[in-house]
Image (cartoon, rainbow, N blue to C red):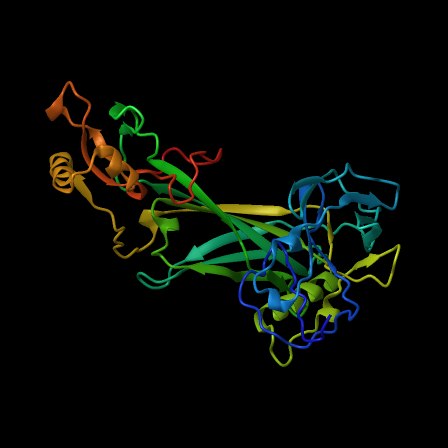
């Protein structure tokens, strides 16, 4: 492999998805691919691990075959413990059901891949303290909303922290409807209440979030900013929820992820860390000359905190949604003018709007028509499944 080819890392939860620049990298010159491992052994959890292979910079975006990694994964313990084998969720993504981790036992991830065995370093589980608070602030009218975390460990055992978060937000169809058009039979029918009025979207953090109290007088992190969002974002159109997860890690893990974060942010820069510096704690036990990248930490537990923000709690500028609707009689006139049918109009992406128009009773006729994206909440990637913890009285 040419020394000018960057072995692109697939980072924690597939963090690297942006632009990539070329720089000199200390990589194998024999063309061998490097196994990249991401994930942590976490007690009492369905831990997720991501496996991938490096790819040449001139590939552009990560080729699909980079994630085509078929392997057998298990968690092993110094006391003879062996977890159930990992379940393959999709290309390169594996899930392992992990039970309780004991303080006096060391654990490691074992990977059987391509005829070899790779293994992370054995280590004792690290206890994660509770999150003191997750908070938010909007200092200026119509300004960005910032999210913060505070945590501490009275035992002084945990000094290095990592976070990720999951967002869920509710969306509403601009023009909810109870009248629908049957393209096959060319007639209208009613479903009440409107089935596609409310939906939910979700997202996971894509940034590497770390902090340390090593240089602080007190073992406390106070109001460490996690991220910002514009109030114009649809996340705040009805109700927004974020769940922050925290784990404590070792100094070596913290240093590894800090280096990786620097690599992500300064890739191609003069002082960017070489990939050889990011080998982590994974080795090939059957053929030591084979390279692997990644760091698997052993964590006894995670801690979480969840908060909600209602639309009325922030200042949000007016936002034009681009949706308009046309009254039924005007639609009818338009179709006559264009010499097209309702079926044609439907195929053009338009749908009925509103409730049954009683002016045409007993016929089932809608009040009007609008673009499908304005009448259904499921069109833009949302789902109808309501989260179990979602409040019922926020309207």
At a point 25% along the width and 51% down the height, the residue shown is 322
At a point 57% along the width and 53% down the height, the residue shown is 164
Q: Position of residue 376 (x, y in %)?
A: 33, 38
**Residue 36 in sight here:** yes
**Quarter residue 339 falls in:** top left
Q: Position of residue 255 (x, y in %)?
A: 70, 66
Left/right of residue 324 with respect to residue 115 in the rendered view: left
Which one is in front, 207 or 376?
Answer: 376
At a point 74% along the width and 52% down the height, the residue shown is 126
Which quadrant, please, contains the N terminus?
Answer: bottom right
Farthest residue to the top: give it. Answer: 362
Q: Position of residue 69 (x, y in %)?
A: 71, 49
Which one is in front, 26 or 382?
Answer: 26
Farthest residue to the bottom: give it. Answer: 270
**Quarter residue 377 falls in:** top left
Left/right of residue 87 with respect to residue 59 in the rendered view: right
Which quadrant, please, contains the C terminus?
Answer: top left
**Residue 153 in sight here:** no
């Amino acid at each position: 492999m040419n020394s000018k080819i960057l072995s692109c890392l697939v980072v924690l939860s597939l963090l690297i998805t942006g632009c990539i620049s070329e720089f000199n990298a200390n990589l194998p010159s024999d063309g061998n691919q490097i196994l990249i491992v991401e994930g942590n052994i976490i007690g009492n959890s369905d831990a997720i691990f991501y496996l991938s292979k490096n790819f040449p910079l001139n590939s552009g975006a990560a080729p699909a075959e980079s994630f085509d990694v078929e392997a057998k994964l298990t968690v092993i313990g110094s006391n003879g413990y062996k977890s159930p084998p990992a379940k393959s969720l999709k290309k390169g993504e594996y899930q392992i059901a992990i039970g309780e981790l004991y303080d006096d036992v060391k654990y490691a991830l074992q990977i059987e891949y391509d005829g070899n065995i790779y293994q992370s370093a054995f280590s004792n589980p690290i206890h994660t303290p509770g999150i003191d608070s997750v908070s938010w602030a909007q200092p200026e009218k119509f300004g960005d909303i910032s999210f913060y975390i505070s945590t501490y460990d009275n035992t002084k055992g945990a000094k290095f922290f990592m976070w990720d978060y999951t967002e869920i937000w509710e969306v509403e169809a601009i023009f909810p409807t109870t009248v629908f058009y049957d393209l096959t039979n060319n007639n209208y029918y009613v479903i009440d209440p409107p089935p596609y009025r409310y939906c939910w979207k979700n997202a996971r953090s894509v940034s590497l979030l770390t902090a340390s109290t090593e240089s602080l007088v007190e073992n406390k992190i106070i109001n460490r900013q996690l991220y910002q969002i514009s109030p114009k974002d649809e996340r705040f159109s009805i109700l927004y929820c974020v769940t922050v997860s925290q784990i404590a890690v070792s100094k070596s893990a913290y240093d590894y992820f800090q280096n990786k974060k620097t690599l992500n942010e300064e890739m191609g820069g003069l002082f960017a860390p070489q990939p050889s510096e990011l080998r982590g704690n994974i080795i090939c036990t059957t053929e030591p000359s084979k390279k692997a990248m990644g760091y698997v930490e052993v964590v006894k537990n995670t801690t979480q905190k969840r908060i909600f923000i209602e639309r009325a709690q922030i200042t949000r500028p007016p936002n034009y949604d681009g949706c308009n609707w046309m009254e039924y009689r005007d639609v009818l006139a338009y179709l006559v003018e264009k010499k097209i049918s309702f079926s044609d109009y439907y195929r053009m992406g338009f749908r009925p709007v509103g409730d049954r128009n009683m002016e045409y009773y007993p016929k089932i006729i809608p009040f009007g028509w609008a673009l499908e994206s304005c009448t259904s909440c499921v069109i833009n990637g949302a789902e109808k499944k309501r989260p179990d913890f979602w409040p019922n009285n926020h309207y």
